[in-house]
Image (spheres, rainbow, N blue to C red):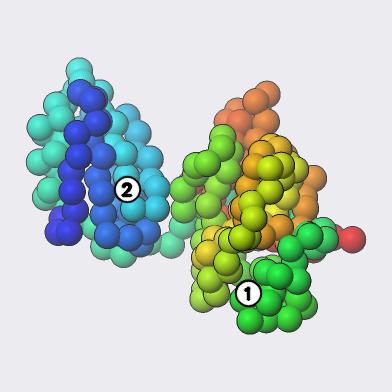
Amino acid sequence: MSDVRLLPYGDTAVLVEVADLDAALALHADLRAHPPAGLVDAVPAERTVLVRLDPAATTVAELRDDLVARRPSVHPAVDGALVTVPVVYDGADLADAADGAGWTVDHLVAAHQERTWRVAFAGFAPGFGYLVPDGDWPEVPRRADPRTRVPAGAVALAGRYAGVYPRPSPGGWQLVGSTDLAVWDVDREPPALLVPGTRVRFEAVP
């Protein structure tokens, strides 16, 4: 691979730093399709992929050699599960988000539902998936003044991403709606509904 950095991450993992999200998704897809010996897990983020290994099956040096030799292509179409998220488009920032996108509220709501979204990676809080659309999407500015508490189930936009807050927490994303779908449930296996690779469609409900 070119334009990457392989960073040490203890004695059972390598952190691969790449150019952008597309490169991270391409590497993650390649590792899933063609796993190296001893692969335990590959965890994507916006510009990195954490690759964990089984020290009984391989070594960090062997894993680094494998990663250097890889030539991942553009990530293939996602074949993850499809989750429909029912949304009441009642968010406090709906008008501001539409204005930031250069759209009307009706256009934003329609476009949000027309796209199929994909969980690119998870972070920030357990069960919080960063969703990217299957087509063009405007950069939606974050709030200038983050909230100290965003309720669970808030459907939000920021930058090129959409997300659903899994539990009450601070947050600076633009709130466009709400859902009663539990995206994080410790009594479920797995607890997170929106894991990387999952496809998501948003559907308006009264």
Indicate the quadrant where residue 105 lies: bottom right
Query: Counting residues from the N terminus, which is met first, the one under dot 1 or under dot 2?
Result: 2
Circle 1 SS class = helix
- Which part of the image, by quadrant, shows the N terminus? bottom left
At label 2, which amino acid type do we have?
Answer: Thr
Query: From this viewpoint, is residue 203 visible?
Result: no
**In the rendered view, does 202 fall on the left or right side of 31?**
right
Between 115 and 106, the one nearer to me in the picture? 106
Q: Nearer the viewer, residue 205 or 148?
A: 148
Identify the disc placed on residue 100. Answer: 1
Q: Position of residue 91 (x, y in %)?
A: 78, 59
Mark 1–mark 2 Cα distance, whole angstroms, equals 28 Å
- Residue at image point 73% right, 50% down: 154
Please tell me which residue is depicted at 75% across the width and 43% down the height of the picture: 151
Q: Quadrant of residue 114?
A: bottom right
Three-letter amino acid code at the position of disc 1 = Gly
In this rendered view, identify the residue nearer to me: 202 or 126: 126
